[in-house]
Amino acid sequence: MDLFKILSTYRDILIVMALTLSILFYFSYTNWESLRLWWKNVKYNNFLFPKTRSLAKNPDMNGNWFHSENVVCRDYDEHYSKVHKDGDFYDACKEYLAIVGESGRRPLGAFMLLGLFGVLVLEAWGFSYTMSGFIDLSASENTRVIMTGIVAIAFAVILAFLTHLMGHEIYRNGIIKRIRNNWQTDKTPKKPSSLDAISKDPEIGDESDVDNPMYKRRLDRLDVSSPSVKHTFTTLAVLAIVIIGVIITFVRVKTLEVAQTQDTMCVAGDDGSSAGEVNLDDLYGSKPPPPPSAVAVSKAAREKGESEICKATKEGSWATFGMLAILFLVLQAFATWVSFKFGFVGKHSKVAWENTHKYKTKGQYETEMDSKARSIAQRAQKTLSNLQSRMAKKLSGETMNDRVDHLINTASERTFFDFLEEEHEQTLSNRNRRTKTTLSKDSEHSSLLSSQQVEVKAQLETVSPDAAPLSDEEMEAQLLKEAAEPELTDEEVERQLLEEMQKKKETPEEQRARLLAKLKAEGKL
């Protein structure tokens, strides 16, 4: 049994299998991270061949951790770090989409994918009917049907691929054109000298280029190799549409000619009988032959009717060809529009969209991310505890290394969150450094306010509320005396304030507040 006979015999089963696989592929694509996490959990904790069984045999150490413990924690940290986000990341994603100009866009959804699939089916169906009579004249009918379907699907897939790239290219060119127009009309001193290259790739939340013009920030975030308008895929798609359309129309015309050639009514000069021929049955029959004039009239009427039928068939076929051509162009336009309307051109726009489109507020986002992170952490801790239990059973008493025994006995002190704290120590130190800088600024500001308050208080204390009011002459003399006094420097004022503070006895509450502010400013708290 050859391949085409197998395909013909099990055609319905193969169609059902193809649809099932397509649905499974779409479900896997939309839930890929959840499936990866589920499979990782199965791989570590299945009851037949769990990965923790082989890891438990390894006594190698990495600092204060077993190497096997690090392997487990790092595998789960890959998923944990993707969802362990705070509300600031939500705001950063919103800002990123706004900078790129894709706040209202979204990727291809299920309905649009079904629409594109319908376009493929219609195109393949139309191509198969057109090419079925010419694909292989020597093959059987079933073989020709299968071969025609394969070729038609190939044509449809190629067209869908090219129209998708064309729509995306048109959308990208529109953004680049707007960026260049804004650059040309920019008259500020911050205007870049040129837009010939992408200078950097800012991540979500990166504010290092906040001083650049908005169009330059947008350009740096585009997923393009060079900031220039290109028409490569547009040209290829238009050429493919024209060539395939012309070929299909040509095949349809030849199909019409073959059909009319095989129709005896549409063959010129062939009317099914001839006036010059003599029927032998009429010579020996009792019925007299019709007169020549009647034969001529009948022949003329028959030719006129046959001519009108053939003409109507030809004109109707051409009208049908035109409608099919219009339908073909509309389908290509629909595929191009879908690719133009959906999808992203920013490098991280899809990630930003995935972290914002389901949540209306920052609070909803934080709640959802905390729930997902907690679920992953629980799975990681369960796997880590299982590994530590296996290692305690496997390695206890089998090694002569005191350090291994110590790590086994202190396994409860090493959790998944401890690993996260150590693994992300650099991130925490950077955060502490930023906090320290902020606290230092606040401390300086508080010190300045305190010195100003002390100065005002000292000025107020110089005037006793019980003292008698001064006359104009006395007040004038006092003001002249104060003006004649030399102005103190910052160091002298600071020294006077310190002397006053030393004279004044400090209470325990004031000492506690002073030391607490000092420790916060130094980043120790």
Image (tube, rainbow, N blue to C red):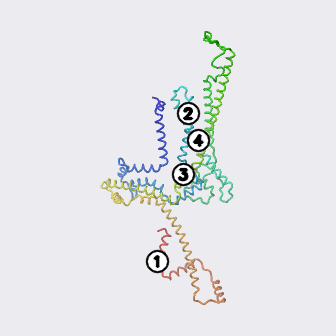
Q: Earlier in the sequence, mark 2 or mark 3?
A: 2
Secondary structure found at label 1: helix
Q: Earlier in the sequence, mark 3 or mark 1?
A: 3
At label 1, the amino acid type is: Glu
- Camera-near label (2 vs 3) is 2
Image vertical order of residue 513 relative to residue 221, above or below: below
Q: Earlier in the sequence, mark 4 or mark 1?
A: 4
Give the residue at mark 4: 162
Between 5 and 305, the one nearer to me in the picture: 305
Q: Quadrant of residue 414?
A: bottom left
Farthest left residue? 397
Q: Which mark is residue 128?
A: 2
Q: CA distance from mark 4 to mark 1?
A: 75 Å
Crowding at dot 3, Cα within 10 Å, few <14 / some 14-19 / many 20+, comes out as some
- Dot 2 and dot 1 residues touching (CB under 8 Å): no
Q: CA distance from mark 2 to mark 3?
A: 38 Å
